[in-house]
Amino acid sequence: MATNKKHLDNFYKEKYSLRDYKMLEKYFRDKNSNEETMQQMHEQWNDFRANKELNTNLDHVFSGLLASINASGTVTPKIIQLFYRLKYVAAILVAAIIISSAIYFVQRNAPVAQSTFIEFASNTGDRSYFKLPDGTSGWLGAESSLKYRMSDDNQREVYLDGRAFFDVFHNSKQPFVVKTPANLDVQVLGTRFGVTAYQQENSCEVVLEKGKVLLSNQNGLHKEMIPSERVVYHPANNKLESVMIDPSDYLSWIDGLLVMKDISLKEATEKLSRFYNVTFDFKTKNIENERIRLVIENESLEECLNLLSKIASVKFVVEERTALTDHRFSKKNIIVLNN
């Protein structure tokens, strides 16, 4: 089998598809084309050394291949650790090693199913950067996950549980769609926007910074958003609330800021619980709807609570973490009292 160089090039140019992956797998399995494939990788490496300005981001390649290997069911912790070490080697060298290593492990077990999901996730209190195969990039907020399906039909469809900011790569022929737990679809061609849609919450928020966004669902809802618009969807009554805002107030979390402008104390504590990985327990009367205006950046939890107690009629009692039966520790619990 002759080696088609474009499949290898697509990995280096961040335009790989499942077809490219499968063709490379065939090249490595075929003894007659294996040597030719390795020679092409060698040439790519030489080109990379000659071009010092090349800055290829292979995070999505790494994530996709690692998920494929995980799907085989026989991956050991040592193999996972090896792949994470390889991730930080020079970009083209990483591609060559990861591609060949992934194909080796996968072909020993089971082929990658078209239903395989690739998942990005962020821990409580963290935010993480992601990049998708189509060139779309963005950030995941705390306690969030983003999944997409490896398939042959080039669909640009992701499933979000939590908070994310998207900088969507423009493609006039194929819209990019965000599926949410609220069953609200967010569809775009190329734009910058944020979505907050946690599974455990009863609403979905979309903030549009640039471009156009189409909101729709199976219940007949249909709305086209414009820049600087914030829309909150309530699944219980299939209604939308829309208001014009400053997008930076709602998207500054990607820079590590927590901006709270004219929101209720209850809503503020919900945001702070994820920001600091704590829980809040209200033992107050007639105070939860008090309005809050506060910007948090590098403040510690204690400093933040001190600031809140100065601008709201509340005081806080911090309960320290306790040991659980599974050798983990509980979150800090903050009791909210009337001042």
Image (spheres, rainbow, N blue to C red):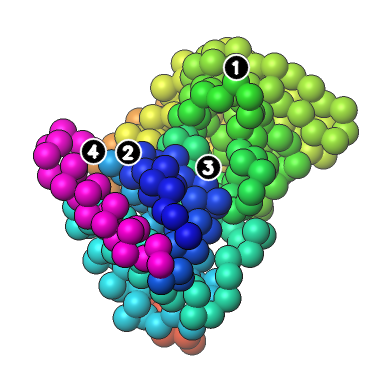
Tell me the magenta residue range: 32-55
**Residue at position x 41%, y 71% from top?**
31
Mark 3 or 1, nearer chain start: 3
Find residue 229 and report its horizontal and vertical position in percent.
58, 16
Mark 4 and 1 residues: CB-CB less than 8 Å, in contact?
A: no
Q: Main secondary structure of the magenta part?
A: helix
**Residue at position x 38%, y 30% from top?**
252
The three-letter code of the residue at mark 4 reads Asn
Q: Which residue is mark 2?
A: 256
Along the line of sight, the residue nearer the viewer: 76 or 194: 76
Mark 4 or 1, nearer chain start: 4
Mark 2 and 3 residues: CB-CB less than 8 Å, in contact?
A: no
Quarter assignment of residue 306:
top left
Label number found at residue 55: 4
Find residue 98 and report its horizontal and vertical position in percent.
34, 63
Image depth: mark 4 or mark 3 in front = 4
Image depth: mark 1 or mark 2 in front = 1
**Residue at position x 33%, y 59% from top?**
36
Mark 2 or 3, nearer chain start: 3
Image depth: mark 4 or mark 2 in front = 4
Along the line of sight, the residue nearer the viewer: 62 or 185: 62
Q: Residue 43: say if magenta.
A: yes
Q: Which residue is mark 1?
A: 212
